């Protein structure tokens, strides 16, 4: 099954319905005008035209309904056809797609979940009503572009990271300069369940990516900021400025004179 094949059938039928509705709307305005002005001769003609409009609407709508009913939406989703075509369409748009498990995808910085049983798609927990893979790919691409163009103050974010890092050091009792897991830093940036819903790990990863791609390695107060790997520490996945995957696990902040 393929939505584009259905769309090729739907498009002319939708146009017929739209044209019939437009004609009916136009004649509806004439009815009001003729009644106001007392133009009974034209009123009779317009009513006859509206009867024709109604018949055309019914015919066009019946044809559209027949095409709609012939497409098994549930089978389209449960067969996996929708998801396969969605992934293909997204990749064709240059979107990095990571399949996590059944129905779950990462399209950095978005988490995408497809519920085949309910024919539902959620992007970062927001429902997106569509069964058209090409439209969905365009939707993700457009939103990624908006994020990429959004302003980002690396100094402000770095300062917030440093504050969360200092808190993590104080709680752990570890010395300055110790590499701390980025997932731990995220918890201090968003310390409550509600805060983590507003600023989840994917949003945090995206901000880390923007900082990384700015090559920001020195805080305004002169301390060094290092994002790096870590043994036995779960990394976060980002995309660099060239769209390549980078796995970062830790944050370390230290002064040049640290002994």
Image: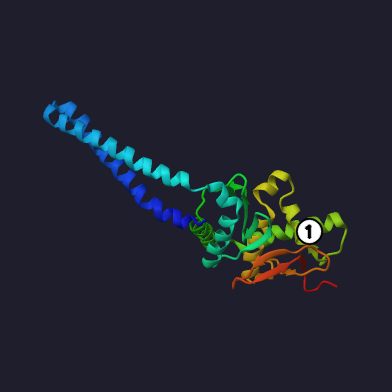
Residue tagged by mark 1?
166
Q: Looking at the image, is 61 positioned above or below residue 184?
A: above
Q: Position of residue 80 (x, y in %)?
A: 60, 56
Question: Which of these two is toward me, 62 or 168?
Answer: 62
Q: Residues within 10 Å of mark 1 (few under 14, many from 20)?
A: some
Question: Which of these two is toward me, 143 or 6?
Answer: 6
Which quadrant of the view contains residue 29? top left
Residue at figure coordinates x 70%, y 66% from the top left: 221
Q: Looking at the image, is 33 positioned above or below residue 10?
A: above
Question: Which of these two is toward me, 115 or 255?
Answer: 115
Disc 1, SS: helix
Q: Position of residue 165 (x, y in %)?
A: 77, 59
Residue at figure coordinates x 66%, y 61% from the top left: 99
Tell how many labels: 1
Which quadrant of the view contains residue 157? bottom right
In the image, is 41 to the left or to the right of 217? left
Taking the view exactly as shown, the residue that stands out farthest to the right is 173
In the image, is 169 to the left or to the right of 77? right
Q: Position of residue 48 (x, y in %)?
A: 19, 32
Q: Position of residue 159 (x, y in %)?
A: 68, 60
């Amino acid at each position: 099954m393929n939505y584009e094949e259905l769309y090729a059938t739907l498009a002319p039928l939708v146009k017929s319905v739209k044209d019939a509705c437009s004609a009916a709307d136009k004649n509806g305005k004439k009815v009001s005008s003729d009644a106001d002005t007392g133009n009974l001769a034209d009123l009779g003609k317009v009513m006859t035209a509206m009867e024709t409009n109604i018949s055309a609407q019914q015919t066009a709508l019946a044809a559209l309904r027949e095409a709609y009913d012939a497409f098994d939406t549930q089978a389209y989703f449960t067969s996996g056809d929708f998801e396969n075509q969605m992934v293909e369409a997204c990749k064709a748009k240059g979107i990095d797609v990571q399949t996590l498990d059944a129905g779950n995808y990462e399209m950095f910085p978005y988490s995408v979940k497809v519920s085949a049983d309910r024919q539902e798609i959620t992007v970062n927990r927001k429902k997106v009503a569509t069964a058209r893979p090409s439209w969905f790919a365009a939707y993700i691409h457009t939103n990624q572009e908006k994020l990429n163009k959004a302003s980002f103050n690396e100094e402000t974010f770095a300062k917030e990271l440093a504050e969360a890092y200092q808190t993590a050091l104080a709680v752990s009792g570890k010395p300055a300069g110790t590499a701390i897991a980025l997932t731990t830093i995220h918890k201090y940036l968003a310390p409550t369940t509600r805060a983590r819903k507003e600023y989840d790990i994917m949003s945090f990863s995206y901000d880390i990516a923007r900082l990384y791609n700015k090559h920001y390695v020195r805080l305004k107060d002169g301390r060094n900021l290092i994002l790096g790997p870590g043994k036995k520490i779960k990394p976060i996945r980002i995309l660099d400025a060239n769209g390549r995957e980078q796995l970062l696990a830790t944050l370390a902040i230290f002064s040049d004179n640290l002994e």
